Image (cartoon, grey):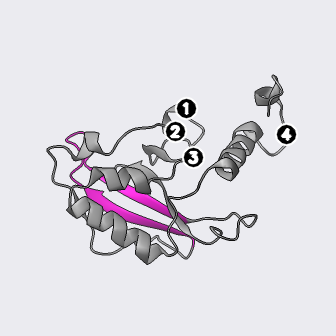
Amino acid sequence: MNQKDAPTIQITGKPDAYREARQLIDFNNSVKNWTFESLAELEDAVRTAIAQYDWRSLDRYKAKVNFFSMSWRQDALDANAQNEFSMRDYMRGNRVYTARTLDEDSNPNEAYLRTWGWSQYVSIWYLYFRKVNFPVDPDIHGNWEWAGIYMGEKL
C-alpha cells in the first residue's frame, strides 16, 4: 500500500479495490476493542448509553475503523460517508429515543436499531450493527460491532 499509484490501480469487478484493501489493512492493524461478544450485549450497551446521555460510551462503542454515517441513498464510496464525529454534538440538548425492538430487516449478520430525536434536521437514525467477519483473528471473528449510522427513514 506504500506504492504511490496504488489508489489508481484498477481490478476488474472491484471498482474500489484500493479502498477495500485499505479498510482490511486498517482493521487488521487496529486494537479492535470496540467489539462485543453478542448482538444482545452491544444492543444493551448502546441503549443504556443513549438512555443515560452517555456520549462518551457511545463514542467508545463506535467502530474505530471504517465507521460510516450516511443517508440511505448515499453511496458508501462517497467521501462524505466516512466521517469522524463525536456523539456529544448530537446528544447535547436533545432527547434521543430507541425503538423497543430491532428493525424487522435485521438478520443473523446485520441489525438495525431505529432511533430518533438526534436533530431537528434529520431526527431519525438507524444504528447499524454487524457481525465481524475476520477469520484471521479468532478472538473477534463472530463478535458484533456498531459499524455505522443510516440517517433518515428507511427506504
Mark 1 belongs to which amino acid? Ala
Q: Closer to the N terminus: mark 1 or mark 4?
A: 4
Amino acid beneath label 2 = Gln
Q: Quadrant of the C terminus?
A: bottom left
**Magenta stretch prevailing secondary structure:** strand
Query: Where does the magenta region start and end?
Result: 109-130
Rounded to the nearest angstrom, the CA distance separating label 2 from label 3 is 7 Å
Q: Of the numbered discs in the image, which one, if any, rests on residue 79?
A: 1
Q: Nearer the viewer, mark 3 or mark 4?
A: 3
Count of labels shown? 4
Left of 110 or right of it: where is 118?
A: left
Is label 3 in a helix, a strand or a loop? loop
Q: Position of residue 97 (x, y in %)?
A: 22, 61
* Whether label 2 touches label 3, CB < 8 Å: yes
Disc 1 and disc 4 in contact, CB within 8 angstroms: no
Q: x, y (%) of residue 99?
A: 27, 68
Q: Which mark is residue 151?
A: none
Q: Amino acid at mark 3?
A: Asn
Q: Disc 3 to disc 1, how far (Cα)? A: 12 Å
Q: Tell me, yes or no, whether the highlighted magenta stretch contains residue 117.
A: yes
Q: Residue at x 62, y 49 (%)?
A: 30
**Which kind of residue does numbered mark 4 sit on?**
Ile
